[in-house]
């Protein structure tokens, strides 16, 4: 069914102050959440750069999987954070031919 005239947008309607305030408070909370999320991701990247565990008597960088067990994100997300913050992988990949 098509409209036969212009849509009535109720130009005389004014939103309540309570609704406007609630939306404003929500927007501030979203901005704060975003700031805190970025801070947490940066902290994870710092941890990946600086945390070591002892394996076979030698210190080794902590793996993404090991760190993921202690944060609210998956190993894949931790790997994404590492890439975003340019953190070198803890395990160096060997070429398929075994040389390198």
Image: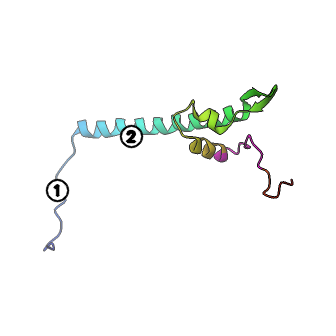
Residue 27: assigned label: 2
How far across and how far down the image is residue 81, in percent? 61, 43
How far across and how far down the image is residue 59, in percent? 79, 28
Task: Identify the main secondary structure in magenta.
Answer: loop
**Residue drawn at x 63%, y 33% as measured from the top left:** 66
Q: Nearer the viewer, residue 93 or 40?
A: 93
How far across and how far down the image is residue 58, in percent? 82, 28
- State the residue lying farthest toward the right: 100
* Above or below, comparing residue 86 to residue 71 in the picture: below
How far across and how far down the image is residue 29, in percent? 41, 35
**Residue drawn at x 17%, y 69% as measured from the top left:** 6
Q: Magenta residues, as a range?
A: 83-93
Report whether 6 appears left or right of 60: left
**How many residues crowd mark 2 within 10 Å: few (<14), some (14–19), many (20+)?**
few
**Residue drawn at x 70%, y 45% as measured from the top left:** 86
- The secondary element bearing badge 1 is classed as loop
- The secondary element bearing badge 2 is classed as helix
Q: Which of marks 1 and 2 is nearer the N terminus?
A: 1
Residue 79: assigned label: none
Looking at the rendered image, the disc whose residue lies closer to the viewer, 1 or 2, is 2
- Give the residue number, with chain letter if any, for mark 1: 10
Q: Does the magenta stretch include residue 34?
A: no
* Above or below, comparing residue 94 to residue 21 in the picture: below
Among the 4 quarters of the image, the one containing residue 99: bottom right
């Amino acid at each position: 069914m098509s409209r036969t005239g212009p849509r009535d947008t109720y130009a005389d309607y004014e939103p309540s102050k309570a609704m406007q305030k609630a939306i404003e408070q929500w927007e501030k909370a979203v901005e704060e959440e975003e700031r805190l999320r970025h801070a947490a991701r940066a902290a994870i990247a710092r941890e990946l750069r600086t945390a070591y565990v002892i394996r076979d008597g030698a210190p080794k960088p902590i793996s993404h999987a090991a760190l993921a067990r202690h944060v609210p994100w998956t190993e894949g997300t931790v790997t994404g954070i590492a890439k975003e913050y340019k953190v070198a992988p803890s395990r160096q990949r060997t070429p398929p031919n075994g040389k390198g």
